[in-house]
Amino acid sequence: MSSGTLADLLESDNSDLSVRRNSQDLQAVVQVDVFGNSVNAFPSGINITVESSVVARPAVSLEIEAYNFYKQKFELVAEPGRRRFRDRVETVSLAGDLTRFITPGSGSMIARVKYVSPNIDQQFTANMDHIFWTIIE
């Protein structure tokens, strides 16, 4: 079950995209993929910023992934720790060969924000307010 839309992720305005994980779900995960484009194929830096909160007891883990177009799979780029109740902003600076996160030609990029429960039966709600990239020339 969810409320809000992907458009709610465009501004830090407390208008959230909320996704609820039910105890009947097969995986103990809530995840959202966010697509974007870079006009710079060879940036000197890429940051992914996530502003979100989660309503859960016990706390769940936040994971931030970026799609690696060379390996054609998501790569874990940050695991900032467990979350519960508080609205927090996490910014991760991607490292290494940054071109692996940008599709050659089109400049497409994909970030995945995941909340992972330690308990397969746990119900929780992830509230995502703002998710964005910063491309450094």
Image: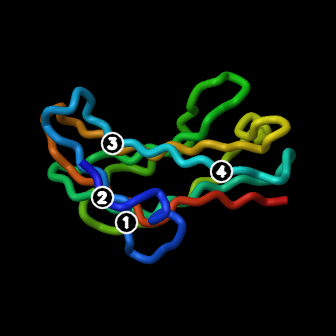
**Is 36 located above or below residue 76 in the figure?**
below
**Kind of residue indicated by mark 1:** Asp
Q: Is residue 10 above or below residue 27?
A: below
Pick whichever of labels 4 and 1 is earlier in the sequence. Answer: 1
Q: Nearer the viewer, mark 3 or mark 2?
A: 2
Q: CA distance from mark 4 to mark 2?
A: 22 Å
Identify the residue at horizontal 52%, vertical 72% (top origin): 11
Three-letter code, disc 3: Val
Which residue bears the numbered disc 2? 3
Residue 51 in picture, x, y percent from top left: 45, 64
- The residue tagged 4 is 36
- The residue mark sitting in front, 3 or 1, is 1
Q: Earlier in the sequence, mark 3 or mark 1?
A: 1
| Pair 4/2: label in front | 2
Query: Label 4 amino acid?
Result: Gly
Mark 1 lies on residue: 16
In the picture of the structure, the residue carrying the numbered disc 3 is 30
- Of labels 3 and 4, earlier in sequence is 3
Earlier in the chain: of badge 3 and badge 2, it is: 2
Is label 2 or label 1 in front? 2
* Left or right of 33, for residue 5: left
Residue at the image position 15 percent from the left and 52 percent from the top: 57
Distance (Cα) linking label 2 and label 1: 8 Å
Q: Locate residue 105: give its quadrant.
A: top right
Amino acid marked by disc 2: Ser
- Element marked by disc 3: strand
CA distance for labels 3 and 4: 20 Å
Q: Residue at x 27, y 29 (%)?
A: 27
Task: Bin the neighbour count of mark 3 within 10 Å (Cα to Cα): few under 14, some 14-19, many 20 and up.
Answer: many
Label 1 Cα crowd, 10 Å radius (few <14 / some 14-19 / many 20+):
many
| Residue contact between numbered discs 2 and 1, judged by CB atoms under 8 Å | yes
Q: Residue at x 19, y 53 (%)?
A: 56
